[in-house]
């Protein structure tokens, strides 16, 4: 409380002092009629600066160097007030300072500062601004135009600062002005600076420097229809050509230079272009007295060779997709729609994510209008799956292997015959499976009742078993991809529809068993064969499906739990799910997940080498806490392969349509033989022997350089100065007076 009282007292005293100074300034300014308060109360140094600025023209350029960032900001506001009060339209002022207070070079504030400074420098170079106040930012390293006036408002602290600021006044007509409080003292320092400058000039003059610009015998030119090639431009043309070659983001394609020297100490360069260039052999230049001319000669000869082979056009620019006239001919792109409505309305750019073009998806003609009809011939085609492995690598999939080898398959019914198609592989988590489509194995005539049952089976298979999304509606029109999927049992190459499965009323149980069912041990009838189950106590969507892989008759819910957190399985379910068992002597079941969320088996899965601990877990459940589905597990496992198999079949039939079309256009007669067996092996498919993916290791410096170039520069280049946020440093602060930094107030003490 005492500290707050003292603070309030100090603030009150400072406010009184500020009021006294302000009253004194107003009283002093009233004596000088027609003059402003600020100028009459300014220091002689500041008055002299304003006197210099008053005589500059709009076409002149003036650079004012200060030591501190605060000085630059206050001086900017003072000059702005001076311009307003004295109507000095010849002065257009700005300031730039560094960003030492910003620690992270990647933060948005740093990017904003950089773009803001670049924008001000551009305006200064374009003569939109003619007075620029700056700290040490512009002493070196920034390219600005020649200035008429270079003013050091604060004395240079050292020789580099003096020579760098003086170098900005490099024109013969430029004036370099240093404002100092003590002229005699600074003259001594300046004399030392002048001696140092003379010594540097003497060293440069006395040393024997090789004349790199000696253009002996470099007058030869090469003319095309639209350009003239000179030795001076040859190297830049070669670099541009190398940059235009195909390359990834981590590779810089540059020419390789090899130098040779003869007995007379003349040099010659041999130029080797990148490996993907049209010219593979090295190109020689001529012997020259210095390296620079020898390099120009090799580049000159290389440009001529590139032009002759067609790698450079008549303007000596690289031939690429962007500037090659043949790629602008729309006759080569018959499907390109220049009148795209979406693109024209929203001004979308080709190649961007927002640019989307509608493409018609083709469907095979053999499956168009091929939906089975009542009392009409329908053709049965079997989707035959055979494991392509001799032995399982992991025993946990042993039950899946047995289900896969059962004489249960799926087939499709169509009203059209299908041509023989190639065998193809699919890639399951536990091994590869070779799929062969046995076409036209039987002709069937379906009555209305059988046809209706097969339709219901088809719907329940995709909706209940495979879990097709609710928002997807089935198209009942006999159009593209029209067929029925049916279950098949076979023995001794005789294939029949499995009516026992077709007649199942409900494939998937969605309701949990009642207490009456649990008391009657409803699950005992399912324990003899592997069934698909779902734990009904888990509130997980989509519902998890498991295959029962084993029945543990020697275990009960009263058996010890695997971890020390719970005593038994019964206590685990009681504590975590608040459910209680009805029969303590029921066996336990071991289950394996079907993994229905990942049913894309088109490409082989490449192992990362890491062991997934979750996949190693053995899941043991209590039978009465599960819903037991009636749909057979053998069909369920193969149903998960259906999306992949049907997709491959569609693409193979499309390829058949394309082959027929090509043969028809080329008038090639092919004798059809539907009984020929396909001999394509699974090993012949590309991607089958793909190895483990390797991580690309980059040098950390190159990676950081790439990140900086790909992010920072893009952000800066996309910013527009008109969209900058309000700069509070350029807003005048009426409630904060910091005049001591600038020697703003000149008070004559009596």
Image (cartoon, helix red, strand yellow):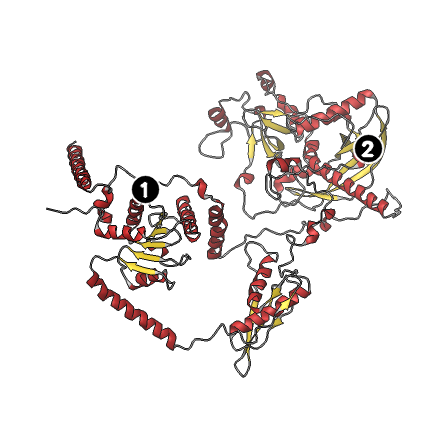
As measured in the structure, the alpha-carbon distance from the residue carrying label 2 to the one carrying label 1 is 93 Å
Q: Which quadrant of the view contains residue 10?
A: top left
Q: Residue at x 85, y 29 (%)?
A: 444
- Along the polypeptide, which appears first: circle 2 or circle 1? 1
Q: Is residue 126 left or right of residue 187?
A: right
Label pair 2/1, CB-CB below 8 angstroms:
no
Tag 2 secondary structure: strand
Residue 544's disc is: none
Asked if residue 271 can be seen in this view, the reply is no
Which label sits in the foreground, 2 or 1? 1
Where in the figure is residue 723, as x and y percent of width and height? 45, 40
Mark 2 closeness class: few <14, some 14–19, many ≥20 residues within 10 Å: many
Seen from the viewer's position, the closer of residues 604 and 85 is 85
Where in the figure is residue 427, as x and y percent of width and height? 67, 43
Seen from the viewer's position, the closer of residues 143 and 538 is 143
Q: Is residue 569 above or below residue 324?
A: above
* Quadrant of the frame with the N terminus: top left
Where in the figure is residue 296, as x and y percent of width and height? 56, 70
The residue under label 1 is 84
Mark 1 closeness class: few <14, some 14–19, many ≥20 residues within 10 Å: few
Q: Residue at x 33, y 62 (%)?
A: 166
Residue farthest to the left, as pictured: 750
Q: Which quadrant of the view contains residue 86?
A: top left
Q: Is residue 238 above or below residue 555?
A: below
Tag 1 secondary structure: helix
Seen from the viewer's position, the closer of residues 41 and 465 is 41
Q: Which quadrant of the view contains residue 500?
A: top right
The residue under label 2 is 380
Q: Is residue 76 left or right of residue 267?
A: left
Asked if residue 346 can be seen in this view, the reply is yes
Residue farthest to the front, as pictured: 33
Where in the figure is residue 698, as x and y percent of width and height? 51, 56
């Amino acid at each position: 409380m005492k500290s707050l009282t003292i603070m309030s007292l100090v603030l009150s005293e400072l406010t009184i002092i500020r009021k006294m100074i302000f009253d004194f300034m107003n009283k002093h300014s009233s004596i000088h009629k027609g003059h402003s308060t600020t100028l009459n109360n300014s220091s002689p140094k500041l008055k002299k600066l304003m006197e210099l600025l008053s005589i500059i023209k709009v076409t002149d350029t003036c650079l004012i160097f200060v030591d501190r960032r605060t000085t630059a900001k206050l001086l900017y506001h003072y000059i702005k007030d001076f311009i307003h009060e004295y109507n000095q339209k010849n002065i257009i002022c700005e300031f730039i300072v560094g960003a030492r207070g910003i620690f992270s070079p990647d933060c948005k504030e740093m990017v904003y500062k950089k773009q803001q400074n670049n924008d001000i420098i551009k305006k200064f170079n374009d003569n939109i601004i003619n007075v620029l106040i700056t700290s040490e930012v512009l002493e070196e390293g920034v390219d600005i135009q020649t200035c008429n006036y270079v003013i050091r408002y604060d004395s240079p602290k050292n020789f580099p600062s003096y020579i760098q600021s003086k170098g900005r006044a490099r024109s013969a007509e430029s004036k370099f002005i240093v404002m100092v409080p003590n002229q005699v003292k600074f003259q001594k320092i300046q004399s030392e600076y002048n001696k140092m400058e003379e010594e540097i000039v003497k060293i440069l003059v006395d040393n024997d420097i090789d004349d790199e610009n000696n253009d002996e015998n470099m007058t030869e030119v090469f003319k095309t229809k639209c350009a003239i090639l000179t030795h001076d431009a040859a190297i830049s043309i070669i670099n541009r050509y190398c940059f235009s070659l195909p390359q990834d983001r981590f590779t810089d394609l540059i020419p390789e230079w090899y130098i040779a020297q003869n007995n007379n100490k003349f040099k010659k360069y041999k130029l080797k272009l990148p490996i993907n260039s049209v010219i593979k052999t090295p190109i020689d230049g001529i012997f020259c007295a210095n390296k620079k001319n020898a390099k120009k000669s090799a580049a000159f000869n290389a440009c001529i060779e590139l032009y002759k082979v067609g790698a450079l056009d008549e303007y000596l620019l690289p031939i690429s997709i962007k500037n090659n006239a043949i790629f602008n001919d729309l006759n080569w792109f018959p499907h390109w729609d220049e009148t795209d409505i979406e693109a024209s309305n929203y001004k979308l750019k080709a190649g961007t994510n927002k640019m989307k073009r509608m493409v018609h998806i083709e469907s095979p003609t053999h499956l168009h209008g091929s939906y089975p009809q009542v009392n009409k011939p329908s053709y049965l085609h079997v989707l035959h799956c055979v494991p392509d492995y001799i032995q399982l690598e992991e025993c946990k999939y042993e039950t899946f292997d047995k289900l896969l080898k059962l004489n249960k398959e799926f087939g499709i019914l169509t009203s059209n015959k299908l041509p023989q198609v190639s065998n193809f592989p699919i890639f399951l988590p536990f091994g590869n499976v070779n799929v062969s489509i046995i076409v036209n194995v039987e002709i069937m005539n379906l009555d209305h009742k059988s046809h209706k049952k097969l339709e219901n089976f088809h719907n329940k298979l995709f909706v209940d078993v495979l879990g097709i999304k609710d928002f997807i509606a089935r198209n009942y029109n006999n159009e593209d991809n029209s067929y029925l999927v049916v279950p098949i049992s076979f023995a001794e190459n005789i294939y029949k529809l499995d009516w026992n499965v077709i007649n199942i009323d409900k494939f998937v149980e969605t309701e949990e068993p009642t207490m009456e069912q649990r008391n009657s041990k409803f699950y005992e009838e399912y324990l003899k064969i592997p069934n698909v189950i779902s734990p009904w106590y888990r509130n997980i969507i989509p519902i998890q499906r498991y295959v029962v892989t084993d029945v543990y008759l020697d275990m009960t819910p009263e058996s010890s739990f695997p971890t020390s957190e719970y005593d038994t399985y019964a206590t685990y379910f009681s504590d975590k799910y608040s459910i209680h068992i009805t029969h303590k002597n029921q066996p336990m079941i071991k289950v394996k997940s079907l993994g229905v969320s990942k049913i894309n088996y088109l490409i082989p899965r490449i192992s990362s080498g890491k062991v997934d601990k979750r996949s190693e877990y053995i899941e043991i459940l209590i039978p009465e806490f599960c819903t037991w589905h009636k749909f057979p597990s053998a069909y369920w496992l193969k149903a998960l392969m259906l999306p992949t198999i049907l997709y491959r079949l569609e693409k193979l039939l499309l390829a058949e349509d394309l082959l027929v079309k090509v043969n028809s256009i080329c008038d090639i007669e092919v004798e059809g033989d539907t009984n020929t067996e396909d001999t394509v092996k699974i090993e012949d498919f590309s991607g089958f022997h793909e190895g483990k993916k390797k991580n690309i290791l980059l040098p950390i410096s190159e990676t950081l350089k790439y990140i900086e170039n790909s992010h920072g520069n893009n952000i800066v280049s996309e910013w527009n100065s008109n969209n900058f946020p309000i700069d509070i440093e350029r807003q005048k602060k009426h409630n904060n007076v910091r005049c001591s930094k600038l020697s703003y107030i000149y008070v004559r003490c009596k």
